[in-house]
Structures are given as C-alpha cells and as structure tokens.
Amino acid sequence: MKKTWFNDLLGKMFTLLIPLILINSLNVLTYIINSIWVGRLIGETGVATIINCYSITIMLTAIIVGIASAVSVLIAQSYGVGNEKGINEVINFGYLISVIVGIVTFAIVIFFSPLFMNILGTPESIYADVRIYLSLYSFAFIFNLLLNVMSESVRALGDTKTPLLFVGIETVINIILVPIFILGGFGIAGVGCANVLAKIFTCIIVRIIIYKKYPVLRLDLENFNFRFDVLKKIIYVSVPIMVEQLIIAAVISLETGISNRAGVLGSAAYGVVAKWEQVFLVLSQSLQALITIMIGQNITKKSMENVYRIVICGIVLAVLPMTVIAIISYVKPEFFCKLFINSDDVITASMEYLSIVGIAYILMPMRLIFNGFIIGTAHTRYLLFSSTTASVGEVIVMYILKNGSSLESMTILGLSVLTYVLLDIFFCFLFFVRGSWKKNFDV
C-alpha cells in the first residue's frame, strides 16, 4: 500500500528529531548531573544558591547566544562565497569582542551582585555563597563566550560533528571535577571552580583542534583588531536574540523573588523543579529546531501546503514529550524530585509546585512548535511581541495574586508561569491560523 504524505513526512521528521534530541541532551547533561551532585552532597542550601543565580546565568547566556550566533551567520555568509579573508577577519574580531565583552561583563556582575541579591530577596543564610558562586561563574563566562564563538564558527563551515566533540570534552571534565571539589570541602565554591577549570581546559583543547583542522579560523594578529563594520553587523543580528532572552531572565528574577518569600525551602523547591524544566526543554527545543529548519526550507520554496503539513506532524510528534512530561509531573513526581535533593520538606514543596506548573510544562512542546514556526518564517519581531506580551501578563497575574490573595508563594508562582505559557501559545497560534505570514512570499 502506498504511503501517505503524512507517513512519509512524519517518518522523516522523526528521523531528524532523534539526533537533535541527542545534541541537546549532551548540552544539558552537565547542568543536570552537577545539580544532582549539588543536591546530594551540599543539600538545600546548595540548590537555593544555584537558583538565586539562575536569572543572571540566563542573562549571560543571552549574551553568549547573541554574539556566537552573529559570528556564525557572518562566517557562513563569507564561507558561502569562498571569502577566506572575510572569514578570518570575522573570527578574529569575534575573539577580540569575546574577550572585551567577557571582561566587562565579569566586572559588572561583581560590582552589581549585592544590589541584584537584595532585589531578589536572597536569604541571608546563602548570601555569601551566592556572591562566591556568581563571581566564579562570571569569570568562567569569559572562556564560555570564547568557547561558543569557536564552536559556532566551526558549525558555520558546515561541520556539525566537531562541535559535539567540544561539548563532550567539557562535559566529561566538569562531571569529574565537580564532585572532587565538593568532597574536598569547597562546597558551592567548588562547583564554581570546577566550572572555571572545565571552561579553560576545553578552550585550550578546542583551540588546538581548530588550529590543526581549520587554518582559516586561526588567530591572526594582523586581523585581531577592532572593526566597526563587523561590529555593526553583529549588533544587527544579535540584539533581537538578546532582548527576548533578557526579558525572560527579568521574569525569572521575579519568579525567584516570589520563591524566596518562602525562605530557603521555597527557593530550593523552585530550584529542583527548574532542573526538570531543563530536561523538558531538551525535548521541546529539539522540536522547535526541527520545525524552524523545515519551515525555513519550505518557505523559501513557497511550498505553503508543506508548511501546514510540517506543523501538523510536529504537533503529532509533540505527543511523546508531552506524555513524558506528564508522567514526571503527575505520575511519579516524588521519585524524580528525589534525584536532586534528600530533604523531605523540599521534596514535598517541589511536588506541590510541580502539581500546578506541570500543566505549563506539558504544553511546552506545543508552545515551542509554534515558536519554531514563527522563526522559520523569519517573523522574529512577532515572536518578540508574543513573548513580551506573555511576560507582561505573567507579571500582572503575579502582582494581583501576591497582593490580593492569601495563596502560598509557590502556588502564585505556578499560576503565573501557566499564564505566560497560555498567552504565548494563544498569540503564536493566532499568527499561524491568520496566515499573515504568507504575505512576504507572494503566495
């Protein structure tokens, strides 16, 4: 019997989805394993410390993603026309701007961290630990930015396998060093030290690999200078990405502040559930990447019928991750929470929070499918509008419940997050069904 378009397309998308999940799994593996080490070996204060740094780490990640993506795009453009001189100019400026931005960011975090912690309402019992961890994390940021610029530059040349090797090297080093430093008596500072050393060692190894394998990406002192023309292009590409991520980071800061109202217990519970959010993102962001790639390919071909088919198959594929998330959130939440913490009180609080926010996590794959659709059609400004509007809605609900109800802090937090997800899905789905995205393609 002849296969239908549905079977063919669904099979193709499933085949492409598996390696994307593996790649994203490797990226998040270090974070998850280190979270287990922190929860098991340090306890609730360690988890609370990490989560109080979470919004700043997202801000730093926004800078990394923005700059690394911009360098990658510019290198890919030069590579497409065989302009090796242009590639070398861009990558050397990338090295220079990474060092400058890294050092400036490190100084800003050190200087403003006390103010930031006061805004969050960081519990006094973990105040010193948060400052130490932030200092070490922001220092590692310098090398992390360089590492991402190097990885993305290799990927821009068409090599998607070597960057996986880079991530694997860093993961192994980090996983080995973290428990050694914690058991050596360094506590949460040991986690930060392990992160710094892992980034430095990986940067050195990656630099050696690139030097041997890709001469065009080598450091060239002649091109290692400040170029305003390249800076202008990097700003144009990176700023929209950074803005969206910074808005999300700001909202997470508010969420952290709400969880801190319940003390270390609430902060730790929020941290435990946030670890599972990272796992859920592996599945959801893999779907988003797949949809973005396939929509982009078919949009340029003006294959609008295939665009609708891709979204339909994406929704079908979302059933699997949505089921996994539902099982973790509602069938066996205690078992999965215990992986990150030993405290019965924190586990109970985590389960209570997960019982509410779990609905939002179940809907996450669906939300990111429509996000991926919008990115694939190149209407990123609408995505920024949707995300911003959803964030404003979340903050309004958070404010009303915080000041006009007697609900517990974690309940307020869960309902606020759910508001964001529902609003984002609504606006993205509205954009999809209205079909206004077709206008730019003369369909």
Image (spheres, rainbow, N blue to C red):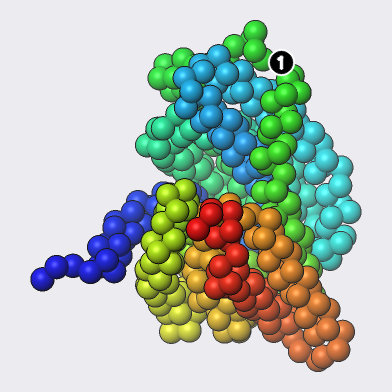
Which quadrant of the figure has residue 48? bottom right
Q: Residue at x 44, y 61 (%)?
A: 304
Residue shown at 29% from the left, 58% from the top: 12
Q: Nearer the viewer, residue 170 or 287?
A: 287
Pinpoint residue 284: horizontal percent, then vertical percent: 48, 64
Q: Locate residue 272, reporting x and y percent.
A: 59, 68
Is residue 357 shown above or below 127? below
SS category of the residue bearing label 1: loop
Residue 281 in sight in this render? no
In the rendered view, does 284 fall on the left or right side of 375? left
Tell me the crowding category of disc 1: few under 14, some 14 to 19, or many 20 or more residues within 10 angstroms, Cα based.
Answer: some
From the top left corner, tell me how far across and down residue 43 is, in percent: 61, 64
Q: Which residue is disc 1 drawn over?
A: 225
- For the N terminus, give its image quadrant: bottom left
Observer-nearest of 262 and 159: 159
Q: Residue at x 86, y 89 (%)?
A: 404
- Check the image and report above or below for 147 versus 427: above
Q: Is residue 301 visible?
A: yes
Residue 411 to residue 380: above or below: below
The residue furthest front is 442
Type of amino acid at the residue the image marks with label 1: Asn
Q: Quadrant of residue 273?
A: bottom right
8 vs 99, nearest the viewer: 8
* Res 89 → quadrant: top right
* Towards the viewer: 299 or 253: 299
- Residue 206, horizontal then vertical, whole percent: 48, 27
Residue sitting at 86 percent across and 47 percent down?
Answer: 112
Question: Residue farthest to the left?
Answer: 1
